[in-house]
C-alpha cells in the first residue's frame, strides 16, 4: 500500500525565482538594495498605491502602520478575534488595548453591524481613546469595507487593513490593501506569493510612508540603506528609536519574481476552489465557503464549515481522520479571546464573541495551493467524502464514491 501525504501548503518556486535569488547571491549585495527597491516599485504599481515599503513580515508591517498613525499607550484599536496572533499583538506593542468585535458567520470577517453596535455603546472616555480599526480579510475574502469605512469616518478613526491573506483580492473592483489608510501584506511561506518570510506596507499618504520607511530601519534618516552604496554617505541621523524590519535583497529578489506570477497563481487557486465547491456542494455535513458577490477572493485558504449536527464526530476528530489518510489540514483561527493571554489579561469569556467561538468548533482549512496535483485534489475530496459517510449521525446514507486505499 502506497503512503499518501498531502501537505497543508507548499510554495510555488520556479526556475526564474531560483535564478533571481542566485543572481542576488552572486551580486555581493544581500541586504536591502536594488532588488528590494524594484520589488517595492513593482508592488506599488501592481496594487495601484503611491508607496510600498518592503519589510521582513506582515507583523512588522502592521506594527509600523500603528506607529505611523500614532497609536499610543492606553489607546484602543478595534479588530476581529478571528485572526492570527500578529493582528492583536501589534496593538499590545504600542501599549494599546485590542477591542474585539464579533464576526459575520458567513464570511468569518469582522461584522460591520457588530462594529457599529459596539462603538455605539462605548463610553465617551473609551471612544476618545479609540484610534483605529484593523479589519482582517479572512482567507483572502475582503471584508465588507464600505460600512466599515463609513463607521471609521463617523468616529474619526484610521483603518489599517490586515491584507496578509490577499494578493490579489478585490472589493467592488478595488484592490484589498488599498481600501483603508494603510495596508499590510504577508509573504510568509504559505501565502499566495512568498518570500519565505516577508511583508509589505502600503499607503497613499506621504507622511505615513516617510515615517514607516524611517522606522523600518532603526529610525535612521531617509535612504539609510544607501549608506554603503556609491551614492550613499557614511553620515546618518537617528530620528527616532526605530526597528530592524527591512527586507533583504535575497527576499526582495524572490518577491519581485513571485509578483509576476500573482495573477496566474490566482487563476490556479480559483479553479481548485471551484473543483472543491463542485464536489462538496453534494455532500451533506459540509458547508462551502461563502463568497460575497462584491469580492474577488484570493483563495489563500479554503475553509469549510462542518455541520456537526449531522456528524457523529467533532471537528478535531475529523482533522485526525484526515491526517490518518495523509491529508494535512489546519484551523484558521483559534479566536484570540479563547487564548490564555487575552482571557487572563482582559477577562474574556468564550461567550463574549459567540459567533467566533461557535464557528471555531466547526471550521477547518483544506490544502489548496498551485502545486497540488489533480490527483491530490481528488484524494482530498474522496477522503472528506469517506469520513462524512462513515461518520454521519443517525443512519448512514451513502454519499457517493468512497476513497480507495492507494
Ligand atoms: C491574518 C494574519 N495577519 C498577520 C499575519 C502575520 O504575517 P507574518 O507571518 O508575515 O508576520 C498572519 C500570518 O499568518 C495572518 O494570518
Image (tube, grey):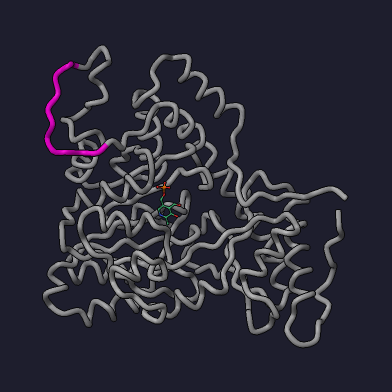
Q: Is residue 394 left or right of residue 51?
A: right
Specify the segment rendered in magenta: 233-243
Helix, strand or loop: magenta stretch: loop
Q: Residue at x 61, y 44 (%)?
A: 10
Q: Residue at x 67, y 64 (%)?
A: 320
Q: Position of residue 331 (x, y in %)?
A: 55, 62
Residue 144 seen by the camera: no
Instruction: Work out whether 100 lies above or below 31.
Output: below
Q: Position of residue 85 (x, y in %)?
A: 39, 57
Say which of 188 and 326 sits in front.
Answer: 326
Is residue 240 magenta-colored?
yes
Quadrant in the rendering for residue 303: bottom right
Is residue 3 magenta-colored?
no
Instruction: Work out whether 34 lies above or below 125.
Output: above
Q: Position of residue 296 (x, y in %)?
A: 50, 59
Quadrant in the rendering for residue 46: top left
Q: Position of residue 67 (x, y in %)?
A: 21, 49
Say which of 285 and 193 sits in front.
Answer: 285
- The residue positioned farthest toward the bottom in the image shown: 394
Amino acid at each position: 500500500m502506497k503512503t499518501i501525504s498531502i501537505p497543508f501548503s507548499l510554495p510555488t518556486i520556479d526556475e526564474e525565482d531560483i535564478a533571481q535569488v542566485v543572481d542576488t547571491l552572486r551580486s555581493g549585495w544581500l541586504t536591502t538594495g536594488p532588488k528590494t527597491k524594484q520589488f517595492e516599485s513593482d508592488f506599488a504599481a501592481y496594487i495601484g498605491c503611491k508607496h510600498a515599503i518592503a519589510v521582513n513580515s506582515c507583523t512588522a508591517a502592521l506594527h509600523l502602520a500603528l506607529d505611523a498613525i500614532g497609536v499610543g499607550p492606553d489607546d484602543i484599536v478595534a479588530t476581529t478575534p478571528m485572526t492570527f496572533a500578529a493582528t492583536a499583538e501589534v496593538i499590545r506593542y504600542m501599549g494599546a488595548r485590542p477591542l474585539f468585535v464579533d464576526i459575520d458567520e458567513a464570511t468569518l470577517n469582522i461584522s460591520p453591524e457588530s462594529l457599529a453596535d459596539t462603538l455605539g455603546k462605548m463610553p465617551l472616555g473609551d471612544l476618545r481613546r479609540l484610534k483605529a480599526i484593523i479589519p482582517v480579510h479572512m482567507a483572502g475574502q475582503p471584508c465588507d469595507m464600505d460600512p466599515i469605512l463609513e463607521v471609521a469616518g463617523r468616529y474619526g478613526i484610521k483603518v489599517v487593513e490586515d491584507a496578509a491573506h490577499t494578493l490579489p483580492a478585490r472589493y467592488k473592483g478595488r484592490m484589498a490593501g488599498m481600501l483603508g489608510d494603510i495596508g499590510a501584506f504577508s509573504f510568509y511561506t504559505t501565502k499566495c506569493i512568498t518570500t519565505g518570510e516577508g511583508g509589505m506596507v502600503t499607503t497613499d499618504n506621504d507622511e505615513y510612508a516617510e515615517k514607516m520607511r524611517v522606522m523600518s530601519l532603526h529610525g535612521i534618516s531617509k535612504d539609510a540603506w544607501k549608506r554603503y552604496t556609491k551614492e550613499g554617505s557614511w553620515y546618518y541621523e537617528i530620528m527616532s528609536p526605530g526597528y530592524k524590519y527591512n527586507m533583504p535583497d535575497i527576499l526582495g529578489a524572490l518577491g519581485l519574481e513571485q509578483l509576476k506570477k500573482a495573477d496566474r497563481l490566482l487563476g490556479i487557486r480559483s479553479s481548485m476552489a471551484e473543483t472543491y465547491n463542485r464536489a462538496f456542494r453534494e455532500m451533506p455535513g459540509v458547508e462551502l465557503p461563502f463568497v460575497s458577490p462584491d469580492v474577488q477572493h484570493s483563495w489563500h485558504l479554503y475553509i469549510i464549515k462542518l455541520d456537526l449536527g449531522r456528524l457523529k464526530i467533532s471537528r478535531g476528530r475529523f482533522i485526525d481522520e484526515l491526517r490518518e489518510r495523509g491529508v494535512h489540514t489546519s484551523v484558521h483561527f483559534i479566536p484570540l479571546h479563547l487564548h490564555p493571554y487575552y482571557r487572563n489579561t482582559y477577562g474574556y469569556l468564550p461567550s463574549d464573541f459567540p459567533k467566533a467561538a461557535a464557528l471555531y468548533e466547526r471550521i477547518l482549512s483544506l490544502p489548496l495551493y498551485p502545486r497540488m496535483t489533480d490527483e491530490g485534489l481528488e484524494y482530498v475530496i474522496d477522503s472528506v467524502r469517506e469520513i462524512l459517510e462513515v461518520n454521519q449521525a443517525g443512519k448512514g446514507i451513502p454519499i457517493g464514491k468512497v476513497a480507495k486505499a492507494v
